[in-house]
Image: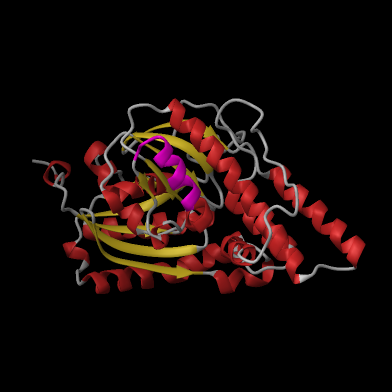
Amino acid sequence: MGATETLMGDNITILGLESSCDDTAAAVVSGRRILSSVVADQTALHAAFGGVVPEIAARAHAEKLDLCVEAALSKAAVSLQDIDAIAVTAGPGLIGGVLSGVMMAKGLSASTGKPLIGVNHLAGHALTPRLTDGMDYPYLILLVSGGHCQFLRVDGPTSFARLGSTIDDAPGEAFDKTARLLGLSQPGGPSVEKSALSGDEKRFAFPRALLDRPGCDLSFSGLKTALLRQRDKLVSEQGGLHAQDVSDLCAGFQAAVRDVLVEKSRRALRACGGITGFAVAGGVAANTPLRAALETISAEFGVPFVAPPLSLCTDNAAMIAFAGAERFAAEGADDLSLSARPRWPLDKTAPAALGSGKKGAKA
């Protein structure tokens, strides 16, 4: 009996590595039990630049990956020899960071003889509802993060059908840009949400793009531009921005994102029959008003709603370990030729939503 056949049970123990953007993470997962999850964020390293600097991120990953692995193994009270397989984000993401993780995983696999599993970062998010809530296939998920926004029907660990996607900015990217325009700290999502608490979401009339067109595709670039123009108008008229202006701008922006995602979710649910539930995952899924609105929509359609804990919405290695176990059971392991990929769409049959080039389709 081969190694793949002997490790098909639900209780195999996986070491997961994640380094696709600005969080260096390692975790140990056994079945659906998260034995440890360690995340070293780089917020302080990028704070002065108003966003993630790929070169700085890659260097920090190279410096922190081994420390995160050691910490994850220690917290899980296991050794490398107790691990059944090693899963790693192999894309998509910032190539320097992805490469750091893949090379680390290859080294661990080669030195221990443990199977190596390359995981699509987006699949990690998309399968999180199975890790946290045991959601059965098929289900609908809104994957909404800093770099991606798409509706996916999840039919299996490697089977995804895209119903719609952003054609320009992802919501998380728009939140970050909004925070920069208004002088708020990064990451932008939490800063904008906090400021919006004391704001009037109806003061400014921000656009809700693509609601006049059929389908589930989304666009947030125009919303960001509208906020920039409204900010400049206020500065011109008043000589600057008051604190209440910032809160009102944040509230209006957040409400526009929420309204678009709610309506597009409604359309996706109409188009997606026979599902076991509706889930949301990704960094922007941590936004409290958005989660509440999506739960209401799910109730309208009479399907269960799943929103993972906030710690599993942002990038983490527990989701990579679990997705690795799911993929391993379905397709087996990779070999040491596994390569890092800056682009890796989940639905390989859907046309590129964000264009393509030498590196392939973005999404």
Can you see residue 149? yes
Front position in the image: 167 or 58: 167
Looking at the rendered structure, the number of numbered marks drawn on it comes to 0
Q: Which residue is nearer to you in this view: 234 or 350?
A: 234
* Residue 127 image position (x, y, % from top left): 34, 45
Left/right of residue 198 with respect to residue 120 in the rendered view:
right
Q: Residue at x 64, y 47 (%)?
A: 256
65 left or right, relative to 284: left
Q: On screen, 284 above or below 208?
A: below
Q: Is 295 included in the stretch rendered in magenta?
A: yes
Colour approach in the figure: secondary structure
Residue 58 placement (x, y as % from top left): 53, 62
Query: Residue visible at 72% across and 42% down?
Result: 207
Q: Residue 274: give x, y in percent of width and height.
A: 33, 27
Q: Image quarter for residue 221? A: top right
Indicate the quadrant containing the N terminus: top left, top right, bottom left or bottom right. Answer: top left
Q: Is residue 83 left or right of residue 20?
A: left
Residue 92 horizontal/vertical position (percent): 49, 46
Residue 139 appears in which quarter of the rendering?
top left
Q: In this rendered view, identify the residue nearer to me: 323 or 143.
A: 143
**Image quadrant assignment for residue 216:** top right
Q: Is residue 103 above or below residue 212?
A: below
Asked if one can make out residue 117 in the rendered structure from this viewpoint, the answer is no
Residue plotted at (43% across, 37% down): 300
Please give the range of residues in magenta: 291-303
Q: Main secondary structure of the magenta part?
A: helix
Is residue 270 found left or right of 117 in the rendered image?
A: right
Residue furthest to the left: 1
**Magenta includes 162?**
no
